Amino acid sequence: MYSDLVDLFTFNITCITMYYMRHILNISLPKEMAESIKKDAQAQNSSVSEFVRTAVRAYKTYRLVRIVKKGEKEYREGKTVAVNSIRELL
C-alpha cells in the first residue's frame, strides 16, 4: 500500500513538472545580495523566483536592445551590406 502511494505521488509530481516544464536552478550568492533580493521581492509582492525571472527577462531585453542599437549605428556609418535576399549572404 505504501509503495502504491509513493508511486502515485511520484506520478503526480512528474506530471506537474512536465506540465510546467520548470527546472530548478540553485545558485550561490553572497549573504547580503540574497537578503537584498528577498527584500526587493517582498517590496514588489513577488516571490524570489518570480523576481529573479523578471530580472533575467529584463537583462535579455537589455541585451537585445544593445544589439539593435549597435546594428543601427553600423547602418548609419555605412558598415552594412544591402542584399535582396538572405541567400545572397550565404
Image: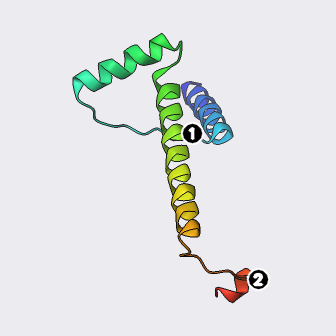
Q: Position of residue 10 (x, y in %)?
A: 58, 34
The residue at which mark 1 appears reads as 22
Say what amino acid the circle numbered 1 marks: Arg
Pointer 1: residues within 10 angstroms few (<14), some, or many (20+)? few
The residue at which mark 2 appears reads as 84
Left or right position of 30 against 69: left
Looking at the picture, does residue 81 appear above or below residue 21? below
Q: Position of residue 65 (x, y in %)?
A: 55, 50
Q: Residue at x 37, y 22 (%)?
A: 37
Looking at the picture, does residue 72 appear above or below residue 15? below
- Who is closer to the viewer here, 66 or 79? 79
- Who is closer to the viewer here, 32 or 70? 70
Q: Under tag 1, what secondary structure?
A: loop
Q: Residue at x 61, y 42 (%)?
A: 21
Q: Residue at x 57, y 66 (%)?
A: 76
Q: Position of residue 29 (x, y in %)?
A: 27, 32
Q: Position of residue 7 (x, y in %)?
A: 59, 34
